[in-house]
Image: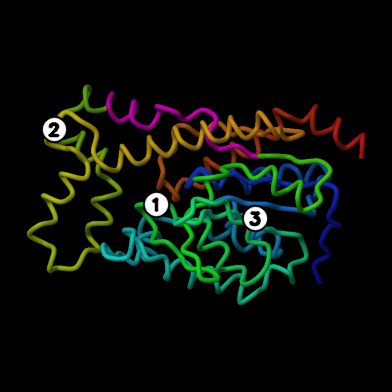
Amino acid sequence: MKILPEKNKKIGLALGSGSARGWAHIGVIRALAEMGIHPGIVAGSSIGALVGAAYSSEQLDEFEHWVNNLTWKDILKYLDLSLLEGGFIRGEKLMGFARQYMGELNIQSLPVSFAAVATDIHTGREIWLREGALLDSIRASVALPGLFAPFKVNGRWLVDGGLVDPVPISLCRAMGAEVVIAVNLNGDIVGKHYKRKFKAREKLSRKSSNEEESGIWTRISGQISSSFYEQKRTFLSQLLGENRDIPGLFNVMASSINIMQDQITRSRMAGDPPDVMLTPRLSRLGLMEFDQATVAISEGYACVERMRPALNQILSEL
């Protein structure tokens, strides 16, 4: 029988939003554990809610194994496309997979105190999901506008928690944490996504540039029903701005989300800073590069090493 380390209820871990960069949270948790830091409180926003739920339900080993073996072919299997439900992806297939690992757990039954952040799409209010079905809280928190369809919880349509609280420090404190370690995935990304793609266009031919920039949408388009076949090429061209000297929809969405989350994070942390801020350097990873887990996890581990002195200071004061 596996003996798990005792969690410290004084330490809270705030796991931030950041799509594919969120796999860095796994590396953070691993590095903290090696230092003897086992947070007993976890608050997650968007991808942070997904990784936080795996940790809080003591399924992180299995979850990390799956993440490390993800390929684009695997990712496509979880994309149940729908253009009529408020997002390109319904998310039911992804949640079906998560159910294999986490089952039908309730948040209240978890061995680690857990909560997820979501946004009420009608009122704009920040919603703290601290009880009820674990998978429902994850699904609501990861509902990135334009990509994932909204999810209904307790009569409210909810979307991504990163819209209102990209790094849920306040939630950690409200749950009883005396010390908060926060992971901000958006600290070095403003402008990087668009600039990287724009420079590639200048250097490469139109053919190679289109292949690089439209990679994700080309893959997704392969899943679109044959009834859309004739319109597919025109549709993707408009999304990506391939035939015009302006960014396409995907570039605009990714860059806008980066800017928004960075500004919100700066504003909220000015009034409620964490005790230690961890900032993985992952600007090179795009919004949907979930098959780059090794890169993200390694950088998550490295960012803890960079902050080891501050973390040791916290340990000495507890």
Name above or below for residue 166 compared with residue 101. above
Separation of residues labelled 2 and 1 (CA atoms): 25 Å
**Of the residues tagged 2 and 1, which is closer to the observer?**
1
The answer to whether the residues at label 3 and label 2 have Cβ atoms under 8 Å apart is no
Percent x, y of residue 56 = 71, 60
Residue at 22%, 41% in the rendered image: 240
Q: Give the residue at the far bottom of this rendering.
A: 104
Q: Residues within 10 Å of mark 2 (few under 14, many from 20)?
A: few
Which residue, as the protein is rendered here, is positioned at the far left?
Answer: 230
Residue picked out by circle 2: 244
Front tag of 3 and 1: 1
Q: CA distance from mark 3 to mark 2?
A: 41 Å
- Magenta part of the chain: 183-199
What's the CA distance linking mark 3 and mark 1? 21 Å
Residue 47 visible in the snapshot = no
Q: Quadrant of residue 111?
A: bottom right
Query: Circle 1: is it few (<14), some (14-19), or many (20+) Cα within 10 Å?
Result: some
From this view, report whether residue 230 is shown above or below residue 264: below
Inspect the magenta stretch and tell me whether residue 188 lies in it. yes
User: What residue would you read off at disc 1?
Assistant: 145
Residue type highlighted by circle 2: Arg
Instruction: Decide if residue 256 is on the left or right side of residue 222.
Output: right
Badge 3 amino acid: Gly
Q: Which residue is mark 3?
A: 52
Report x, y in % for residue 47: 54, 51
First-in-chain label (3 vs 1): 3
Q: Residue 179 location in percent, x, y? A: 81, 41
Left or right, 97 with reference to 80: right
Mark 2 or mark 1: name the one nearer the start of the chain: 1
Closer to the chain start, of discs 3 and 2, is 3
* SS state under label 3: helix
Q: Secondary structure at mark 2?
A: loop
